[in-house]
Image (cartoon, grey):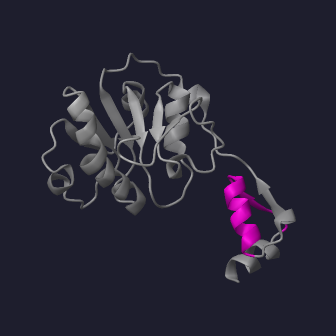
Amino acid sequence: RFLRSLVNDFERTTVVSSVERDHLSAAGCEVGRVRIIPNGVDAGDLLVRHAPLLARLVYPGSITYSANLDAVQYLVNEIYPKVRAARPDATLEVTGDTGDVDLDTLSRGQPGVTFTGRLPDVKRTIARSTVCVVPLRIGGGTRLKVLEAMALGTPVVSTAKGVEGLGLTPERDVLLGDTPDEL
């Protein structure tokens, strides 16, 4: 009811995807007042081209946000060991704020896992990575990490949740998987 009253009290409400608009519709909001303005990134700011380092995975995101923490736990515990089994030289860099998260427990002694903390400019790290892995399973948000990686020319491997609302075409724009083996 609160959401419906907010949307209906304003002349216009903006959302970033049809998924969000459909959510508002299901909540009984007047969807005629809702406009979709898709997320984007300033491509001029992202034209940083660097040769990627082979076998480097990157997860750009603050692990102080619960959805990112869950994704990184899933990545480190379930996905990364499979990558390392196939590519023993693989490394994983997790960028973003780490807050009070116990990084030793989170990394579980996995070789090649680095938590960079907040970087002044994450674009170079993303651009120098072989792939941006986005194994989100919960949460919502803008998914700017995916758009930035794509704009930098870094391939993206993600769960369906990780690219939700972006209107990407699987196998053309992104590789999708929802299990560790698929990812």
Query: Does the magenta portion include 25?
Result: yes
Q: Quadrant of the C terminus?
A: top left
Q: Position of residue 47 (x, y in %)?
A: 53, 22
Q: How many marks?
A: 0
Q: Nearer the viewer, residue 65 or 163?
A: 163
Q: Is residue 97 above or below residue 30?
A: above
Query: Which residue does the image show at 53% across and 31% down from the upper left?
Result: 150
Which quadrant: the N terminus? bottom right
Q: Which residues are magenta?
A: 11-27
Instruction: Kindly give the residue lying farthest to the bottom in the view shown.
Output: 1
Q: Looking at the picture, how far across and down is residue 77, in whole percent?
A: 25, 50
Name the residue at the top extreme. Answer: 51
Tell me residue 142's x, y (percent). 57, 51
User: 120 and 38: which one is in front?
Assistant: 38
175 or 131: nearer the eye?
Answer: 175
Q: Which residue extends farthest left?
A: 109
142 versus 43 height, above or below: below
Left or right, residue 164 beside residue 149: right
Q: Is residue 13 above or below residue 92?
A: below
Taking the image as shown, residue 133 lies to the left or right of residue 163, namely left
Residue 19 is inside the magenta segment: yes
Q: Position of residue 132 (x, y in %)?
A: 42, 35
What residue is rendered at 20% in x and 26% in y?
89
Q: To which quarter of the image does residue 82 belong?
A: top left
Q: Of 44 and 69, which appears nearest the observer?
A: 69
Quarter assignment of residue 168: top right
Q: Is residue 99 left or right of residue 177?
A: left
